[in-house]
């Protein structure tokens, strides 16, 4: 009963929000991941390039609030009267992980922009396969249909979906059940960091390799495994130190592992040997998109990291020990063989020789993987994604903008690790 009353109050607050005047120069941002991701990158760009816009960050902690203030943003603590007032008068709200990034109850009448935090091969939102829809019990099927309907209604409250390219646009149209006009391919704020302009400086990524203590002469293979809902113990195979020595001897290869923020670090520490060629990165404040520039090669599975890293034209290797289970889960947008070009690894015994060859310079096949991904995605990867998004949103809400106050800055070289 109490939960029903709470839901009723939230719904009433959302409906009444449509009656409030909303200031077109007040924009709000937030992220369940803290001061991070596309929301952070775009908010910082707005604060620096368009000071006439009030860019507010809805913070969940003192540390997050401090980081946002240091970046030049206005800050309100989630749940506070100030946050409720700001969100109730903001004309635009930006999301990167969903409505949980901010307080959805106060967004009635706001122009909501969704900037997905990546484009993985895993299906998302309404595209995900729900086995309950095929259940033998009609009650379970009915509950599944109701759940899907509720999700679709919430997604229908999004006014604009930002895709990084044409492939992403096609997927987001079905994932959001959105009409053509709602999904636009403008690039993504992540690209501004990966390309190495001022956005990279703002997240402190210019000298990240040195700060992480990674040797300048090492061939850094950056391993970014995706998040598994069921945890990591079931999929992560143990790596034998002798096998590591046997295959990588005589090469400069070093494996730097950055597990997902929600991953179980203890599983990684237990399955990976203490070895000079292994670095387990547990710094939660390391920006993952700045980290992409550190790697001379990428090792991943189904993650959106592959689609972003392809921008750098560096080798990509695929490691998917749990491929059989993933095929029967929430689903992949395309067969793994198509996504990887048919070259992937399910065991260390297969993977380690490929990493060794890549470290010795025999990386043509791995580089071809990156080029194939980039060609298929047809991304808007020229510099200035954040500014394109700002201009598109301003046009949709009828706001005339002054010229951007900051220069785009030079991009860094894309053909080698830093």
Image: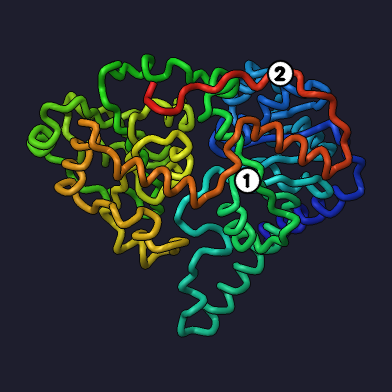
Q: In which quadrant will I find the N terminus?
A: bottom right
The residue positioned 46% from the left and 32% from the top of the image is 288
Residue 264 numbered tag: none
* Residue 106 percent across, percent down from the top left: 78, 44
Circle 1 crowding by C-alpha within 10 Å: few under 14, some 14–19, many from 20: few
Instruction: Name above or below for residue 378 compared with residue 279.
Output: below
Secondary structure category for the residue under label 1: helix
Residue ID at (58%, 78%): 142
Q: Nearer the viewer, residue 306 or 129?
A: 306
**Residue 270 is drawn in which quadrant?**
top left
Is 12 situated left or right of 370 in this image? right
Secondary structure at badge 2 equals: loop
Tell me: 196 left or right of 13. left
> Where residue 241 appears, x then y in whole percent?
11, 35
For the residues labelled 1 and 2, say whether their Cβ atoms are less than 8 Å apart.
no
Ranked by sequence position, the earlier of labels 1 and 2 is 1
> Image quadrant of residue 250?
top left
354 to 135, vertically: above or below = above
Q: In front here: 369 or 152?
A: 369
What residue is disc 2 on? 406
Q: Is residue 176 visible?
A: yes
Quarter containing the C terminus: top left
Which residue position holds label 1?
100
Query: Residue at position x 58%, y 19% from top?
Result: 410
The alpha-carbon separation of the residues under discs 1 and 2 comes to 31 Å
Label 1 vs label 2, nearer the camera? 2
Q: Is residue 283 shown to the viewer in this render?
A: no
Q: Position of residue 373 (x, y in %)?
A: 44, 48
In percent of width and height, residue 339 lies at 40, 56
């Amino acid at each position: 009963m109490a939960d029903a009353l709470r839901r009723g109050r939230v719904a009433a607050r959302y409906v009444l929000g449509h009656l409030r005047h909303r200031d077109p120069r007040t924009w709000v941002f937030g992220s369940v991941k803290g001061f991070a991701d596309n929301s952070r990158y775009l908010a910082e760009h707005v604060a620096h390039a368009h000071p006439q816009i009030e860019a507010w960050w809805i913070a969940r902690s003192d540390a997050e609030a401090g980081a946002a203030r240091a970046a030049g943003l206005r800050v309100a603590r989630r749940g506070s009267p100030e946050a409720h007032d700001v969100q109730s008068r903001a004309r635009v709200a930006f999301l990167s992980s969903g409505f949980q990034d901010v307080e959805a109850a106060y967004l009635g009448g706001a122009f909501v922009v969704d900037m997905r935090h990546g484009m993985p091969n895993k299906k998302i939102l309404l595209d995900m396969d729900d086995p309950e829809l095929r259940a033998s019990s009609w009650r379970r099927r009915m509950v599944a249909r109701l759940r899907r309907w509720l999700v679709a209604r919430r997604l229908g409250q999004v006014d604009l979906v930002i895709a990084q390219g044409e492939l992403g646009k096609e997927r987001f149209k079905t994932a959001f059940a959105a009409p053509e006009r709602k999904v636009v391919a403008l690039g993504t704020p992540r690209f501004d960091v990966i390309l190495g302009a001022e956005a990279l400086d703002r997240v402190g990524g210019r000298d990240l390799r040195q700060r992480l203590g990674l040797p300048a002469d090492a061939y850094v293979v950056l391993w970014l495994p995706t998040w598994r809902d069921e945890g990591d113990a079931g999929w992560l195979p143990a790596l034998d130190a002798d096998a590591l020595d046997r295959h990588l001897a005589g090469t400069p290869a070093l494996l730097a592992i950055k597990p997902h923020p929600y991953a179980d670090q203890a599983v990684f520490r237990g399955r990976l040997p203490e070895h000079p060629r292994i670095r387990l990165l547990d710094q939660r404040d390391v920006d993952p998109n700045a980290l992409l520039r550190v790697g001379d090669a990428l090792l991943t599975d189904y993650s959106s990291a592959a689609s972003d890293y392809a921008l750098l034209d560096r080798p990509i290797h695929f490691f998917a020990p749990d491929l059989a289970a993933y095929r029967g889960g929430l689903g992949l947008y395309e067969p793994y063989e198509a996504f990887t070009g048919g070259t992937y690894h399910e065991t260390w015994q297969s993977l380690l020789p490929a990493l060794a060859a890549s470290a010795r310079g025999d990386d043509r096949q791995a580089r071809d993987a990156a080029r194939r991904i980039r060609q298929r995605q047809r991304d808007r990867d020229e510099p200035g994604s954040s500014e394109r998004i700002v201009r598109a949103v301003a046009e949709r809400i009828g706001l005339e903008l002054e010229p951007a106050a900051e220069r785009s800055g030079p991009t860094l070289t894309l053909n080698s690790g830093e």
